[in-house]
Amino acid sequence: MKKYILAFDQGTTSSRSILFDRKGNILHQASQPFRQIYPKPGYVEHDPEEILKAQISSAEKVIKEAGISVPEICAVGITNQRETTVVWDKRTGKPVHNAIVWQCRRTAPLCETLKEKGFVPLFQKKTGLTLDAYFSATKIKWILDQDPAFLKEAQEGNYLFGTMDTWLMWKLSKGSIFATDYSNASRTMLYHIHDLCWDEEILSILGIPKIMLPEVRPSSYYYGDIDPSFFGEPLPIMSVLGDQQAALFGHGCFEEGYAKNTYGTGCFFLINTGKTPVRSENGLVTTIAWGIGNEVTYALEGSVFIAGAVIQWLRDEMGILKTSAESEQMALSVPDTLGVYLVPAFTGLGAPTWDMSARGTVVGLTRGVNKNHFVRAALESIAYQSADVINASLEDMKNPLKVLKVDGGATQNNFLMQFQADILKCPVMLPNTPEMTALGAAYMAGLTAGVFEDLADIQKNNTYSKTFYPAMPEKEADQKYQGWLKALEAAKAYKA
Ligand code: ADP
């Protein structure tokens, strides 16, 4: 019997390969970083060929080091950094430009022009997204605008567009797979998430030829095989999912109302809203979580720009900490922040406040405040900002949260996780495996391959190392949160 599932986790800074057994346990993993290219302030690019090489070499490494043979792998699952855009020439297989990374702001002026023309409601209604440079649509337009010949090539079907999943599959199948899944398509800002098709009107507004777009398939789907020239044997690709959606799936958030928050540099919150898309009145985006068979599951998504990054800042710029981990002991060495709130609005405030001109603010300083209070306020700010996003989504869904599943580097901080449970008044569950994104892709591939019978069969494998239950009196939690809301007002009031 084929024993293993291989997940490709094509992230923003590295391409990783992780080998799972049939129960979702990690057997071995390998990672290969690639260059971050910054041609100008605010511009971020990747070399697509380098990403492909990094993916292949990490897979070779994991297979070799785990001591398994390729025929023992029953399925490959792909999860990827979302929105990052590559356009390539299908005749040569060469990218026509470096990939434009999701973080890249180069198309912000184009988005402003579209906003001025009144297109925000149209984009929101069809794609579920706020009109922003983050998503692929304006990045594709920018590439096509670089040379008068590009548009013609695209119209004639010579140029293809893909997010990283599409690019990897096309290359690894030697051009025979040109596809993406619903979750990735829903982040391009070109996909009609209700009608489940590329949207002709948006394509015509942006002047993007439909012929350059990939087929959209379910996330659980047999896409085709990796050509045997890469690993010696053909390997079937059995799932594709964007990274945040994959983490939601990895956590087993299969039902409406189940949610996960990832605590990394920023935070990414997703809540499963079931078979119907929920439109946010609070600045969150509506997205497709995944498609299985004929059914599509939707999610609401919100993010916090500065989360773990505030701890990095205290460490690297302020020199208050030596290591991120040290923040836990420092926070616990004082009973509270002595009334201090730190709002790390270094790049403005995201959902649900949306104030791009807000800047970092500290309020409530008194003579007795020391660095431990300050560090504690920084950690609490991560929980408050997450609570803002989570509460906004719950208002949209009109439902309380049953439990929050968590992952990411900063979940190692017990103080932070406990404080999050206290402020949300809801249990916070930390899984045993830290690799939720790759696990989600592996579970989905295993579902396609018949390793798992159904979602319940997958759910059985998920185990949690810790659950943080709310312990703070509710009144105290409310008072603290009210203080945070006042601090947010202060951050908004100051204009540089
Ligand atoms: P990313 O994938 O965004 O690079 P990770 O999931 O690796 O992030 O998490 C790293 C972030 O978590 C860093 O910003 C770091 O400061 C923060 N972090 C890591 N460990 C801790 C800790 N024990 N307490 C608080 N923050 C932490």
Image: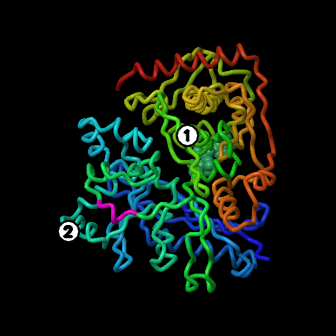
Local SS, label 1: loop
Instruction: Say left or right for 235 vs 109.
Output: right
Closer to the camera in the image, 138 or 485: 138
Disc 1 under 8 Å from ligand 1? The reply is no
Report the amino acid beneath label 1.
Thr
Question: Would you identify the image quadrant in which residue 226 lies?
Answer: bottom right
Q: How is the image coloured?
A: rainbow
Magenta: predominant secondary structure element? helix
Marking on residue 430 = none
Quarter of the figure that contains the C terminus: top left
Marking on residue 276 = 1
> Is any atom of residue 303 visible in this view?
no
Closer to the camera in the image, 187 or 362: 187
Q: Report the magenta residues as a range.
A: 209-213
Judging by the rendered image, the residue that carries numbered circle 2 is 149
Q: Position of residue 460 (x, y in %)?
A: 81, 52
